[in-house]
Image (cartoon, helix red, strand yellow):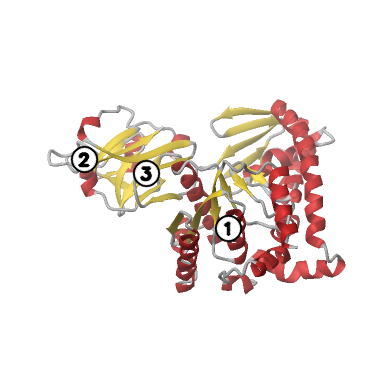
Amino acid sequence: MMNNTLHKISSYIEEKKLFLKKDKLLVAVSGGIDSIVLLHILHHLHYSIQVAHVNFQLRGEESNADESFVKQVCEKLQIPFHTKRVDVKTFALENKGSTQMLARQLRYDWFQELVQEHQLNYIVVAHHANDQSETILQHISKGAGIAGLRGMLPKQNKIVRPFLCIDKNNIQYLAEQLKLKYREDSSNASDKYERNQIRHQVVPVLETINPNLHQSIFHTTHYLNGVEMIYQSYIQKRLNKLVIRIGEQSYKAAAKSFAHDGFGLNLLFEWLHPYGFNSEQLNDIYTHVKLGSSGKKFSNIFYQVFVDRKFLFLEAIEAKVVVYKMVNEIPYQSTINQKNIEIKYTDKSSVSFDKKNLAIFLDAEDIQFPITIRHWQEGDYMYPLGMLMKKKKVSDLLINKKIAKQQKSNLLLFFSNEKLLYVESIGIDERFKIKDSTEKIIKISIN
C-alpha cells in the first residue's frame, strides 16, 4: 500500500506539473503529522528541499518545542532550516485583525521572501483531501462562487499542494510505515476555530452517508476546475468590456449591463467578490440594480460600492493602519503594495541624493532592530532632516508636500524601536542622518 500511495503522489505531481526534479523547493513544516510526512516523502523522492517553520508563540513552550523538533529533524536529514518567531497575538491586537488570518498573511509573506532570497522555485504545503473537503464546506456555509466550490488549487502561483490527492488515513499510514515522530498541536482538539467545528461535527455526519467523502469531493473538484476555466474565460471577457477604470483604485460599470443580462448576478459576483463583498451584500446590490435604485452604499473594511441609476462605482476606502513587515536582519527584500523594498548595508562612496526621497541613507549605528514597516496613522511624528530637531507631525508634512489623499494612505513609514526613520517621498529623520563619524550605512530603496 505504501508504494501505491507514493506512486499516487508522484503521478499527481507529474500530472499537475507541480514541479520538476531540477526545481528547488521550500517546504512549510509546522511539526505536525501532515508536514512531517510531506518533508520525508519529498526527501525520499530525492527532491532539492529547504524547510521553513514559523513560531507564532501562540502556545508558549509548546510552540518553542515544535520549533526545536523541526530543527532537529532537518539537522538529521541535513536539510537547510529557516525559522521565524512572530508575536502574532500582539500583532493582531495592534492591527485589529483576526489572529488566524494575520498569521496566514505573515507566514506566506515570509515564505515569499525566502523564495526570493534563496532563489527557490516553489513553496510546498501539506494540504490534503480532508483539508480540501473542510475548505469547500466552509465556503458553502458562507456562500461561494465556482472558485469557492472547487476549493484549493494544486498549483497556485508559487504555492503547490502535492498531497491533495491523498487523505488523512493515507498520511497516517505513511507515518506508521516510515516510523516517523511528529508533534501534536493541542489546539486541533478545540472547537474554538470554525474549521475544527466542521472537522469534528459536520464531516463525521457526512461520512456516515458516504464513507469515501473526501475522495468523492476530490474527484468533484477535479471536474469543477475544468468547468471554472471555461466559465472564467467567458466572464472575464464580459467584465473587460463592462468595467472601466476611473482612478488608481476606483472603477465604474453601467448598471443596466447587470440588470438586463441573464448572467447579471454572476458578473456582479465575479467582479466584486474578490474585493471582499459577501454573497448577502452582492444579492442586495443586484436587487437595487434591478430596481433602478440610486444613492445606496455598500462597504467592507477595504472597499465600497455606490449604486447610481446609471452606474455602479467601486472604490477603495482609505487603508487602515497595518504593520506589514518586521525586519530583523539585512540585507532584506520584499514587495509591499506593488512596491519593491530593499534594505542593505553600504558605504559612504555609494551615498547619493535622491530628490524624490525613494532611496535614502542612514547611520546604521543609530538603528535598532527590528525595523518596522507600516502605513501612516494619526499621531505619527518625526524630526525632519535639516529642521534643527523641530518635531513635526507627519500629517502636516504630507499636506505641505501636497500629497494626494489616495497616495497618502499607501505611503510606507519605517521605524526603529518606535522612532520614525523614514517616510516614503518625505525623507529621513534628523536623528538617523549620516555624520562625519559614521562608518556603517544602511540604504533603503523603494521602486
Q: Nearer the viewer, residue 294 or 115?
A: 115
Q: Nearer the viewer, residue 421 or 383?
A: 421
Which residue is labeled 1 in the image? 39
Image quarter hosting the C terminus: top left
Q: Secondary structure at mark 3?
A: strand
Between the residue at mark 3 and the residue at mark 1, the CA separation in whole angstroms equals: 38 Å
- Residue 129 can be seen, yes or no: no
Q: Residues within 10 Å of mark 1 (few under 14, many from 20)?
A: many
Q: Position of residue 97 (x, y in %)?
A: 52, 57
Amino acid at circle 2: Lys
Mark closest to the chain's N terminus, 2 or 1: 1
> Would you identify the image quadrant in which residue 428 lies?
top left
Query: How many numbered callouts?
Result: 3
Q: Position of residue 375 (x, y in %)?
A: 42, 45
CB atoms at circles 3 and 1 under 8 Å apart? Answer: no
CB atoms at circles 2 and 1 under 8 Å apart? Answer: no
Which residue is labeled 3 in the image? 413
Which residue is labeled 2 in the image? 433
Question: Disc 2 or disc 1, which is closer to the eye?
Answer: 1
Mark closest to the chain's N terminus, 3 or 1: 1
* 103 displayed left or right of 221: left
Question: Disc 3 or disc 1, which is closer to the eye?
Answer: 1
Q: Is residue 45 above or below residue 344?
A: below
Between the residue at mark 2 and the residue at mark 1, the CA separation in whole angstroms equals: 47 Å
Amino acid at circle 1: Leu
Residue ID at (75%, 32%): 233
